[in-house]
Structure formats: structure tokens, C-alpha cells
Image (spheres, rainbow, N blue to C red):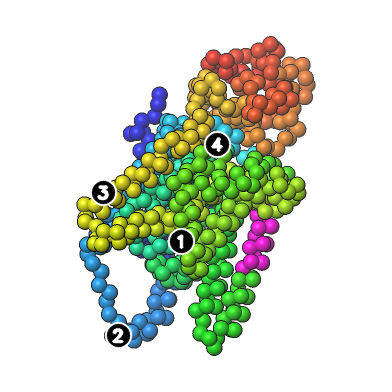
Amino acid sequence: MEMTWVAFLPFVAVATILIFVPGLILGVCASLRGWALLALAPVLSIAMIAISAIMASVIGIDWGIIPVLVLTLIIGVVLLAISGLRQGLSHRSLRSQAGRGRKDSVSVPSVTVDLLSSVAAIAIALALATRQWLQVIGRFDSFSQTFDNLFHLNGVRWIIDHLDGSSLTLLDMTGIFNTTVEFYPAAWHDLVSLVCLLVGDINIPAACNAVIWVLVALVWPLGCLWLIRSLLGPLSPVALIGAGILTASFAIFPTYLLGFGIIYPNIIGLILLPAVIGLTGTILRLFDSSRIPLPESLAAMILAGIGLALCHPNSILSLLVAVVPMGLIWAARGIADAKQESRRKASLLYGGVAVAALISTVAVWIVLRPPIDSADWGPGSDPEDALAQAVFAGPFTIPPFWVLGLLIIIGLVSLLKSWRNWWVVGTFALSVWLWMVVESWESTYPDPGVRWWLTGGWYCDPFRLAALLSVTSIPVAAVGWKAVVSWIPQKIETWRGRPLPVWMTVIYSLMLLLLLLLSTQTGKMSVAINWAAPSYVMNEDSALVDPDEYALIQQLPEIVPAGERVATVPWNGSSLAYGLAGVLTTTTHIFHEETPDLSTIQGELDEASSDPAVCPAVERLDVTYALDFGTRALWNADFAAIAPGFIDFATEPGFTEVARVGEAVLYRIDAC
């Protein structure tokens, strides 16, 4: 039966609380206010969740909400101490200035207008993102039937079963690496597992969808809008509401990426990125309108950096794409603002810091690259097409968004007028260049090693770098949007020789917003939705689990005794029996450790009655049942070569059919 809103809302409520409340507590302790508090709260919350999962595992405490609350309390006290120390050190200076300063007068109507505009911007962004999300997932309890979701759904189940959410132990589920140090960024899985545990319903697909909704509909627009407001300062209502529309207008992210992979760790890292870029700009004092005390902002940045790394390490590389241009402009501003007599000293200081930062960036770039054999995505366009796709927000099958492209071009021209904002241009240009490298390098340059060196941190994957384009394009487009909405009235007023009447200004503003809305949310956005949505549809052509197979999986907990294991093949989706129903399986992901016993089962299980090697392997792994989901495999792989021992259950002796739904069958292994 299809899940209803009423059943889904507890997952949404718990996900919202987990994503915002710990961070709001820390943000208040760190003297964050307003937009900064709202935008950075999810970053800090997810950092607390992922860090506490590691610490709980190391200490030997069961995973749950308690470790998150304890760590939040400890870090909150530390932030309060930092804030108190800073205030104590500056108390004398503040007291001496108390009699000389004057209070700035703030118009109550202007504050009200800004508040209402902010609420409207968030509301329209939330509505647009929710519409896109619903059109992609279709049902509240649907799940992406793609390659990576085998690991993600099973990984959440493993954390719940073992009450261990550490990024240092999650790979134990698969045994992929037989080393003393294992690492897989588990922030996503920790968050989803907590939602399930607190709701009291281990419906992992519903929890995943609730978390994704909160991220794309609330966290993403809040981070983008804070970055835009920090960059541009106070905005008119039409400029701010238009910026809200822009956050949900780039089809490649989040919408398009929801159908690819599905790479949840990358998605959550990119969604947090705008807020962390905003925090970086605040620390470097690149924004005139955003002031957070430096000690607290540095502490928040440390937590944010750890949180990003525990979402996905290439989130750090994506952050560096913004930080490098930021750092260069910071150094240039520091030198330019220095007094003439201290210009040489400032040049040495800022230049030295910039060089050290660039060296550190190169080192991080090298360390965070995976092995070259894991970066096997090839290019798909020539350089000219790749450039056009980036500027007009239309990579892959997405048609060009002409309005977005025009806004990006206008924004770039506007930003170039002041060199102090060139870092925004540099960030955009660097992301476009990396996209062009990954999408078109080998069509012009034959050396794949260079392409891997530059983009290997993203697995040389065009989809991941195309998604990064949205992060760097939105601020540029917002600058262009602000220029358009202010330039046209100025020209009309010059032509008329007098100000526009209020009614004409309102009509003009509504027309512009309607044009932006229609040009970004109709046909071209539908292309991205129509591309992503099929991966969430369960039918006879589903890549992992069809309706009959899903129905059989739901019956397994009533048939298979607890602690006994079912033989499965990840390539045909049967291994999802673990993530979806909690039944132990022999495999949990396509990439797994091929032990001798597992190899025997995969290759010879259906010969258990005649092959003396099979039953000992079956007994050692506590396997009592086998799932037969047919021989169709992901990517049209050769099932007979992958798992020849799962082909002849129906004709070989020693296997008893226990349950069947259509062609999906559960066999009991009686031969052993």
C-alpha cells in the first residue's frame, strides 16, 4: 500500500529536528544570528552527528541520539567559553567606545519588508524544490533503483543492526578492504539511521526521502540565499524573491543528480557547500554585510570542514574551488588596504600566507584523489559544447536555459567592474574549467593522466562536476538578476523624467518574477525531472527490484529465522533483502570481499547435492535459504559469469521452494 502523508510526516519532522536543532544550539553559542544561524545550523548539526558516531564507536557506546546530544553539549560549552573569552578581552575597548558611538537608526518598515521578502524567498524556493522532489520520487517510500543504492540502503541497515555509525567501520559491512584502517564517509548513513531509530520505524526508503526533502527544500535554499545576501548586501524584495527562485532553477542540481548513482554522500556535501563558502567569505572579511566574531567563526569553520569531509572527501575539493580564488582576493585586498609605509610588510605577510595556502591546496588535492583505476568515466563533448553547456546551465540532455545563461553573463560583467569581487568570477571560471576538463579533455588532449590529476577527486565523473556548476553559478546569476531588476526601472525613470508610480513598480516586479519562474520551471526543468524519475519507478523493468521481488522481500522476515542468512546476488538486486527487510544476506554490495566460502556459494551453490565443497561453505556462513531473482543483471552484465551457482535451483535436487511471488522465488537449502 502506498505510503500517505500522515505516515511520512514523522520522518520529515524528525529529519528536520536532527538537521537543524543541534546546529542552532551551537550557532547561538557561537554568536551566530539571523541568516548565518539558519544557513550554518545544518552544517554544524551534520558535523555533530558524523563526529559523534565515530567517537561513540571508539568509546564503545551504542549509536543513537545520546552521543549527538552529549557532543553538542560539550562543543556548545567550548564555543561559549571562546565567546566569553573574546568578549572579556574586548570589554575594555568596547567600554571606552561606549560614549563615543551612536546608534544606527533602522527603519521598522524596512525591517518588516526585508523579513517578509526573506520569508517569501524561502517559501517559493521550498515550494519549487518540493514540487521537483515529488515529481522525481513519485512515492514517499520509493527508492532509487541504481547501482550505489545497494550500498546506501544496506549501509543504513548495518548501522541500525550494529548500533555503530562510525565512518571507520561502515566498510565492515562489505569487507571490501582488508586493512587496519578503513574509511567511508558515513554522515548520510548516520543521519538516516538516526531518523529511523527515533521514529521507531525502520523504513529506510522513507527516511532517505524525508532527509532528501529537508536538504533540497530547506537546507539548500537557505545556504544559497545566505551566500547571495552576504555577497550583495541588502536586496530589494523582487531581487530577493528572484534569488529564491534561482536556487531551484538549475536543473542539474539537485534534481538531475537525484537520478544518478544515487550518490547520497556527494549530494549532502554539495547541499552544505554554499553555507560553508559563505562562512569562508565571512572569515576572510570579503563581505561587508556579514559580521561574525572571528574566533567563533574559525571554530565553526573547523567543525564545518570535518563535517564536509565526513559527508564526502571531494566536498573539501569542491570547497577549495571557491577558497583558492577567495584567498587570492583576500591577499590582494590586504595588500591594497595597507598603508603606504607598511605595504612591503603586508605584501610579505599576505603573499606568504597565500603561497602556503596554495601549497596546502595542492597537497590536499593529491591526498584526496582515489586510485586512477576508480576514475573510469570518459569525456562526452568537445570543448566548445562543454563551455556552452556550463554557461547556459544545460549539461548532458538538458536544453540550454537561455534566461539563466543571460543572467550569468550579465552577472560576470557586473562582477568584473570591481576587482574585490573577482573571487566570485574566479570560482565560477575554475568550476567551468574543471567541468570542461572532465567532459572534453581527451577529445583535445590525449593524456588521461592529466585529466585524472585534475579531476580524479571527483572520480573523473562529469555528473559530479556538473553538479558543482550549480553551486558556483547561482551567486553569479543572482548578481545578474539584481542588475536587471535595478537597471530597467532606472532607464524607464530616466526616459519618463520622474519616478515610477507604485502600481507600475509592482506590475513590473511581478512580470519579471513570472518571466523568471516560467523560463526556469517549465519545459527544460521537466527534462531533468523526466530523466531522474524513472529510477524511482518500480515496475517489471526496474534495474534492481521489480514489484514481485519487492513483495517477496517483504515476506522474508516472517519466513527466515533471525540470525540465519539468505544467499543473494547483488547484481540482480536480491541483496537489497537486507536493507529493505533486515534479513541477513551473503552479499550487501557489488563490491565485496570475495572470500573462498562466498566464492564457492556464488559459483556452485546449485550443485550443493553433488559438490562436496558447497555444504561446508554454506554451514560456515549460516546460509539456509537462497533468493532467485532471475538472471537479469545491472548494466546487462553476464550473470552466468558472475553467479553461475544461482541459475539451476529449480532443476537441481536439494532445494525446496518456500515462497514465490511471480518469478521471484525463495528456496530452502535442504541439500545441506
Circle 1 sits in a helix, a strand or a loop, which is it? helix
Specify the farthest residue to the bottom: 341
C-alpha span from label 4 to label 2:
61 Å
Structural distance between the alpha carbons of marks 2 and 3:
46 Å
Q: Nearer the viewer, residue 275 or 71?
A: 275
Q: Secondary structure at mark 3?
A: helix
Q: CA distance from mark 4 to mark 3?
A: 35 Å
Please report whichever mark, 4 or 1, sits nearer to the chain's N-terminal start: 4
Query: Type of residue at label 4?
Result: Thr
Mark sitting earlier along the chain (4/3):
4
Sequence-first disc among 4 and 2: 2
Label 2's element?
loop
Q: In this picture, which residue range is highlighted in magenta?
A: 357-369
Mark 4 or 1, which is nearer the eye? 1
Does residue 211 lie above or below 413 as drawn? above
Circle 3 residue: 507
| x 51%, y 81%: residue | 338
Determine whether, in the image, residue 304 is placed left or right of residue 120: right
- Which quadrant, please, contains the N terminus? top left
- Whether 601 is drawn above or below 219: the answer is above
Residue 495 is a magenta residue: no
Amino acid on which disc 3 is placed: Ile
Q: Residue 149 in the image: x percent, y percent?
A: 56, 36
From the image, tell me which residue sits under label 1: 414
Q: Residue at x 48, y 68 (%)?
A: 418
- Label 2–label 3 contact, CB within 8 A: no
Which disc is residue 100 wearing?
2
Q: Residue at x 45, y 38 (%)?
A: 525
Q: Where's residue 465, x and y in %?
A: 58, 48
Q: Is residue 489 visible?
A: yes
Give the percent coordinates (x, y) of residue 347: 59, 79
**Please, what is the three-letter code of the amino acid marked with disc 1?**
Ser
